[in-house]
Image (cartoon, helix red, strand yellow):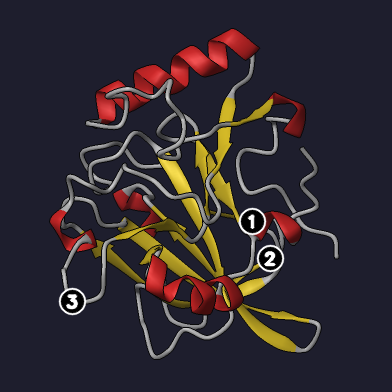
Amino acid sequence: MKSHMLLDPGISTSQYFRVDLSITNDTLGDALKDPESCQAYLDRVLEKHKKRVAFGGYLERRGLYDGFGHFNPGESGKREYHLGVDFWAPAGTSVHTPWKGRVHSWANRTARGDYGPVLLLEHLIYGKPLYSVYGHLSSGSLDGLFKGREFEMGQEVGRLGTASENGGYAPHLHFQFVRDLEGYSGDYPGVCALEQLEFYRENCPDPLDYLNFSQ
């Protein structure tokens, strides 16, 4: 199924580079301890490979969340498996919907380590609903939204936020598909514990399988 690019369409997929932020990447060191060190690491990787956007992370086991208390509530296990794909690019980069959709819900989740401004759209794919999650947007991306607002395929839905507004991360888009929102509104888990992984693997399919994205 044809889809539109998620980020600024002026950046071709040839300018994307898959990055590994998992706990098995020994080159990370302390790169994920704060937004500045994370950005510096990504900048070095992109400069080395002469690319503009770093991406990846579906079902990646990360240490990135160790410093954020709400990822580790205790009773359900340590949440460290990433359920979407991240696209790391400069703050202000435009974000677009891959298909026609309508607004399901949105929120500004301001806790440190959370999504910051987040938007959820509902799509109809092969006759079945599929929801897309856009996390870590700019605050202004939420202006003018209302439930049921329609977006055409490829229409801009927002822009990437800064670390001061996106939950405390280097600027990036957290993009995730969800089959069943389980009653969530303006939110859906983007990271899970090992004990929950099989459920979320089924409920949150790999976005790259849907996005005509071959790399």
Q: Nearer the viewer, residue 170 or 95?
A: 170
Residue 195: x and y in percent read: 39, 73
Q: Position of residue 45 (x, y in %)?
A: 52, 17
Find numbered disc 3 in the image and state the secondary structure of the residue it sits on: loop
Q: Nearer the viewer, residue 73 or 166?
A: 73
* Secondary-structure class at tag 1: loop
- Give SS at disc 2: loop
Q: Are marks 3 and 2 in contact (CB under 8 Å)?
A: no
Say which residue appears at 85% left-offset and 65% top-offset: 1
State left or right for residue 208 relative to residue 122.
right
Structural distance between the alpha carbons of marks 3 and 2: 41 Å
Q: Which residue is mark 3?
A: 75
Q: Is residue 210 left or right of residue 64?
A: right
The disc placed on residue 147 is none
Badge 3, how many Cα within 10 Å: few under 14, some, many 20+? few
State the image quarter where residue 153 is shown.
Answer: bottom right
| Pointer 3 with pointer 1, Cβ within 8 A | no
- The residue sitting at 32% across, 43% down in the picture is 63
57 over 36 or under it: above or below: below
Residue wearing tag 2:
152
Marks 2 and 1 in Cβ contact (< 8 Å): yes
For label 1, the residue is 155
Query: What's the CA distance linking mark 3 and mark 1?
Result: 41 Å
For label 2, the crowd category at 10 Å Cα-Cα, with few meaning under 14, some 14 to 19 and many 20 or more, is: some
Q: How many numbered marks, from 0 up?
A: 3
Q: Residue at x 52, y 46 (%)?
A: 57
Q: Amino acid at mark 1?
A: Gln
Picture quadrant where residue 10 is located:
top right
What is the quadrant of the C terminus in the image? top right
